[in-house]
């Protein structure tokens, strides 16, 4: 069967400057996700100005959280060496989204902003992730087993990260692009129908957790943990539990007390 073939160099050389597709697409993803969130806010006559801070917190929290989580999975002892947090390769999406979400939630709480701002960030998140993950596809990152599935990717460039440029592999980056695109297509039309603050945020986090649970059956870059499931899948289960509990608590807080 035909597979997707990509022969793009993972880096762009501009004289003395080397740019990585991964960094370019992540930056574009944060920008475009923030623009989508700002539109969501303008539709509700809310100021989009906090989105600038959201974007910074998402970038910082995403990078640091993803790096910490990766080291926890693969080399916990490296956490005792602070320089390892900013050097070396290896990032885990779950850690990035968890820390970024915590930082943004703390900012919303401290600034006295409405929980609607969390919904705004959640509305733009899937679009930002879909664009940001394109760099993973180009680089050949997060690959799984060799495959001739029609969505398998052969990274033909010799500097790609797949083991052999002559073969196609399940591409976790592509599956994440598709997952995020589907989530965005599902939640964007619902943005006017979910009236309770924070409902949209919980929905997006829950959809990502559930979707990534199944995606990791096709990826091989997360260590096995227990019961045939890997770290990422157990993290998804934990996030789903948090979403269910958090949504229940916020629902009760939003409901008026009976008199």
Image: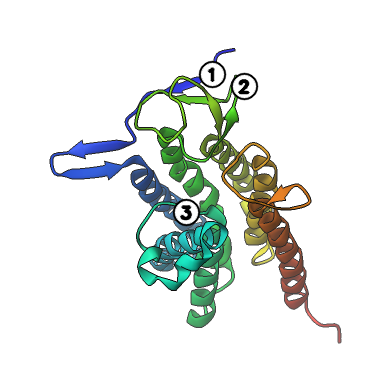
**Any part of residue 187 in sight:** yes
Distance in Å between CA atoms under marks 2 and 3: 26 Å
- Specify which label sits upstream in the sequence, 2 or 3: 3
Based on the displayed image, in which of its 4 quarters is residue 221 positioned?
Answer: top right
Give the vertical position of 102 relative to 128 (above or below): below
Q: Which residue is mark 1?
A: 3
Quadrant where the C terminus is found in the figure: bottom right
- Specify which label sits upstream in the sequence, 1 or 3: 1
Seen as rendered, the residue at the extreme bottom is 259
Using the image as rendered, state which of residue 196 and residue 45 is in the foreground: 196
Label 1, secondary structure: give it.
loop
Q: Which residue is mark 2?
A: 149
Label 2, secondary structure: give it.
loop
Q: Position of residue 104 (x, y in %)?
A: 50, 69
Circles 1 and 2, Cβ within 8 Å, touching? The answer is yes
12 sits to left or right of 166: left
Q: Residue at x 46, y 32 (%)?
A: 162
Seen as rendered, the residue at the extreme right is 259
């Amino acid at each position: 069967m035909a597979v997707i073939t990509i022969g793009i160099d993972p880096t762009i050389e501009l004289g003395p400057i080397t740019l990585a597709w991964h960094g370019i697409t992540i930056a574009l993803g944060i920008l475009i996700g923030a623009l989508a969130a700002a539109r969501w806010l303008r539709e509700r006559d809310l100021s989009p100005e906090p989105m600038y801070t959201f974007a910074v917190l998402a970038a910082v929290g995403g990078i640091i959280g993803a790096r910490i989580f990766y080291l926890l999975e693969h080399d916990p002892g490296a956490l005792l060496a602070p320089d390892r947090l900013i050097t070396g390769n290896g990032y885990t999406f779950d850690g990035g989204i968890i820390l970024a979400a915590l930082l943004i939630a703390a900012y919303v709480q401290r600034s006295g902003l409405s929980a609607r701002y969390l919904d705004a960030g959640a509305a733009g998140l899937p679009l930002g992730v879909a664009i940001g993950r394109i760099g993973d596809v180009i680089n050949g990152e997060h690959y799984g087993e060799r495959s001739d599935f029609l969505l398998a990717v052969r990274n033909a460039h010799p500097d790609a990260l797949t083991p052999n440029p002559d073969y196609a592999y399940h591409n976790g980056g592509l599956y994440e692009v598709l997952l995020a695109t589907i989530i965005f297509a599902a939640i964007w039309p619902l943005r006017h129908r979910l009236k309770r603050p924070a409902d949209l945020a919980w929905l997006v986090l829950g959809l990502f957790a559930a979707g990534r649970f199944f995606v990791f059956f096709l990826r091989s870059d997360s260590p096995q943990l227990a019961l045939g499931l890997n770290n990422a899948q157990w993290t998804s289960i934990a996030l789903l539990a948090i979403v269910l509990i958090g949504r229940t608590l916020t629902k009760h807080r939003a409901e008026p007390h009976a008199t």
